Amino acid sequence: MSSQGEDVCTTITAGKLLRQRIEAGGFILAPGVHDGFSARIALEVRFDVLYMTGAGVTASVHGCADLGIATLNDMRRSAEMIASLSPFTPVIADADTGYGGLIMVARTVEQYSRSGVGVLHIEDQVQTKRCGHLAGKVLVDLKEYLARIRAAVQARRRIGSDIVIIARTDSI
């Protein structure tokens, strides 16, 4: 503490680091990673933001296309391992549809935040989702999607996290 009683130690989190990068302007290049090996390669060539891809994790863990097969535990485990490799390198993580109803959306935010993820994105597909680059996607109505985003924001507030929440759409 300083002589005025102020806390001079500021915790820099992945969310804060990415917010600083966004505010600085310019492009943010974040290669898709799915495991420790791919993350280490990206870090070795000096990328300063990583993107944990759901398609990559699903292919790596389950050996198949991203058709909603990966669970919150699969993704959280990968996110935690990737984020732990370099705590000052923000990780943007695919959170699919939040892995269930609104309670699971909140749990996803909590688990990703505790895992060191700086940013997550939640998509607007139905629970039995398909990877964004595959045909045949079905979207939820706007009311349901907004409820997901609200649940994520409320969870972030409740746990005192600064994780960035991206509302991702497959409607375009």
Image: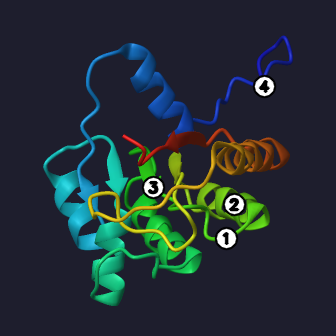
Front position among marks 3 and 2: 2
Q: Secondary structure at mark 4?
A: loop
Q: Which mark is residue 1?
A: 4
In percent of the image, x 22 and y 66: which residue is there?
A: 38
Give the spatial CA distance, label 3 vs label 4. Answer: 35 Å
Residue pointed to by mark 3: 93
CB under 8 Å between callouts 2 and 4?
A: no
Q: Secondary structure at mark 3?
A: strand
Residue pointed to by mark 2: 105
Front position among marks 3 and 1: 1
Say whether residue 142 is visible: yes
Which of the marked residues, 1 or 4, is nearer the chain's N terminus?
A: 4
Q: Residues within 10 Å of mark 3 (few under 14, many from 20)?
A: many
The three-letter code of the residue at mark 3 reads: Ala
Give the spatial CA distance, label 3 vs label 2. Answer: 14 Å
Number of numbered discs overlaid on the protein picture: 4
Which of the marked residues, 2 or 4, is nearer the chain's N terminus?
A: 4
Front position among marks 2 and 4: 2
Q: Quadrant of residue 34?
A: bottom left
Which of the marked residues, 1 or 2, is nearer the chain's N terminus?
A: 1
